[in-house]
Image: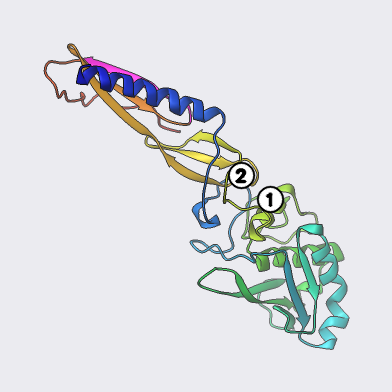
Amino acid sequence: MSKQRILHLLSIFLVLFVLSSAFGITAYANSIDSFLVDSSTRWANYSEGVTIHMGSKNTTYSYSSSAVKNTYSTYVTTGIGMWGSYISCTESSSSPMGTITVSAMDSGATADLGPTYYTSTKHMASWTLTIYSQNFDDNADAGKYRTIAHEIGHAYGLGHVSYDNQIMYDTYSESKNVTSYDRAGMNVMTHTHTHSGSYSTTIEEYSTYSHKVRCNTCKAYRLGNCSYTDYHSGSTHYFVFNCSCGNDSTMSWACSGNPCIMPFSIQPSHELE
């Protein structure tokens, strides 16, 4: 069998393999850091470039004083309760991970979350939720509950989003709530949902040379590269563009000799606008 014939059959096999995998694809990854978020995901990591997260549903906290507890415990427990069974955040006097404190400083914020984390695992080591009483106390109860729920989201590793109906929206609101997108992100932060092993995905176009492999559970994605092959047959050169997102194509042009150079004007049509 000629070399050209072997290359031709190999290219057909690659196309069929890629196309078949697009319909029942599963993906594999070892860390949540290998996944990215975008406007379709609608949840974000707490810190750019570092996926600080709790790594578990469980965390504990205590109040900095009995006066803080007496004044704010109702808002704290109600705000935590907005996350339902997606987290287990309980008060404990025995080596608590978190501290809830109050400041009279006018910071311009209603509350703030300060975390520390282990550099090896990026899991939360400790956190401090500071309530700024000058701004917090003037708000309606509905806003106070949501402020606490928002900061607890940070304690678990969630960042800000741009959707004003979500609890992780970065601006004070008395109507935002814990949505399915917030909960999907929380499942990642607690390792209830992980990106290890096999899981259902959807393939989307991304660029000329790659596609998005989107997790169907949490909507985060990782990038996968497309592949190319070419072969020469007779006086024609063929270029086969293979990609799991399904945007496969074959281009050809007349040429003499082998190897043959692709004309500069011919480019793979795989741009995502």
Viewed as shown, does residue 77 lie left or right of 151? right
Above or below residue 161? Residue 5 is: above
Q: Are marks 2 and 1 in contact (CB under 8 Å)?
A: yes
- Label 1, on which residue? 184
Residue at the image position 75 percent from the left and 75 percent from the top: 60
The residue lying furthest to the front in this view is: 1
Residue position marked by numbered label 2 in the rendering: 219
Q: Residue at x 76, y 54 (%)?
A: 178
Answer with left or right where residue 43 lies relative to residue 88.
left
Query: What span is in magenta?
Result: 245-253
Return the x and y of residue 37 as percentages of the image width and height.
55, 49
Image quadrant for the N terminus?
Answer: top left
* Amino acid found under the numbered disc labelled 2: Lys
Q: Earlier in the sequence, mark 2 or mark 1?
A: 1
Residue 107 percent coordinates (x, y): 65, 77
Q: Is 95 on the left-hand or right-hand side of 200?
A: right
**How busy is the neighbourhood of tag 1: few (under 14 within 10 Å), some, or many (20 plus)?**
many
In the image, residue 55 sits, relative to residue 63, either above or below, namely: above
